[in-house]
Image (cartoon, rainbow, N blue to C red):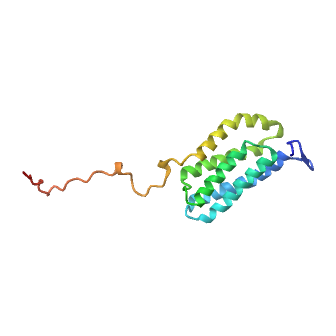
């Protein structure tokens, strides 16, 4: 097991993870934005799953345990979409993009700043994991027709005779 102080030719494990996260984060952003444009293109999901899986593995290797459940939850959302168990709605895509944003915050951190950042962001990240683990809010599901409560009641035809009284 390696510690964060492990060194590969002068490059820290955090630096290696940041490169990995930046590359996969860019793929996630591009893929999610492409999904928003063409939400029926299932071929877009597989690369998203691979990117989340890679981030999860890299986080585990370097001991950034905070990112393991986050990347795992992202991967689960992509699996659910691939298997048609849950749609990647605009609301879900927004949640996933917030996860990518958090991961991309790492690129500006030094090894010395990491512990403080993890401490400051852990609650936010736990909240994102909870959101991704919860069903997508129903209001965010694409609606093709207005909800019944919004449809105005049909006005009676003025030429219609009153209903006949039955005794």
Q: Report the residue at 56% width, 55% height from top.
A: 88
Across and down, in percent, residue 136 comes to: 53, 49
Q: Report the residue at 30% width, 51% height from top.
A: 152
User: Can you tell which quarter of the image residue 80 is in?
Assistant: bottom right
Question: Which residue is the extreme one toward the right?
Answer: 9
Q: Report the residue at 77% width, 46% height from top.
A: 107
Q: In this view, does 20 lie to the left or right of 74?
A: right
Q: In this view, does 91 lie to the left or right of 143?
A: right
Q: As rendered, which of 67 and 98 lies closer to the eye? A: 67
Across and down, in percent, residue 157 comes to: 18, 56
Question: Which residue is the extreme one toward the front?
Answer: 167
- Count the labels in the image: 0
Q: In this view, does 63 lie above or below 146?
A: above
Q: Report the residue at 78% width, 41% height from top.
A: 109
Across and down, in percent, residue 75 comes to: 66, 53
Across and down, in percent, residue 64 comes to: 77, 43
Q: Is residue 119 left or right of residue 10?
A: left
User: Can you tell which quarter of the image residue 52 is in?
Assistant: bottom right
Question: Which residue is the extreme one toward the left?
Answer: 167
């Amino acid at each position: 097991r390696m510690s964060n102080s492990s060194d590969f030719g002068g490059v820290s494990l955090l630096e290696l993870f940041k490169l990995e996260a930046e590359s996969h984060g860019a793929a996630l952003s591009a893929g999610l934005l492409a999904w928003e444009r063409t939400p029926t293109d299932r071929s877009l999901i597989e690369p998203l799953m691979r990117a989340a899986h890679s981030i999860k593995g890299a986080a585990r290797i370097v001991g950034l345990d905070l990112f393991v459940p986050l990347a795992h939850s992202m991967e689960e959302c992509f699996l659910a979409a691939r298997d048609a168990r849950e749609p990647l709605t605009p609301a879900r895509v927004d949640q996933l993009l917030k996860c990518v944003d958090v991961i991309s915050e790492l690129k500006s951190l030094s090894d010395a700043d990491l512990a403080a950042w993890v401490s400051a962001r852990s609650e936010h990240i736990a909240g994102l994991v909870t959101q991704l683990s919860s069903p997508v809010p129903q209001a965010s599901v694409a609606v093709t027709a207005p909800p019944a409560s919004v449809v105005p009641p049909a006005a009676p035809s003025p030429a219609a005779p009153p209903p006949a009284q039955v005794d």
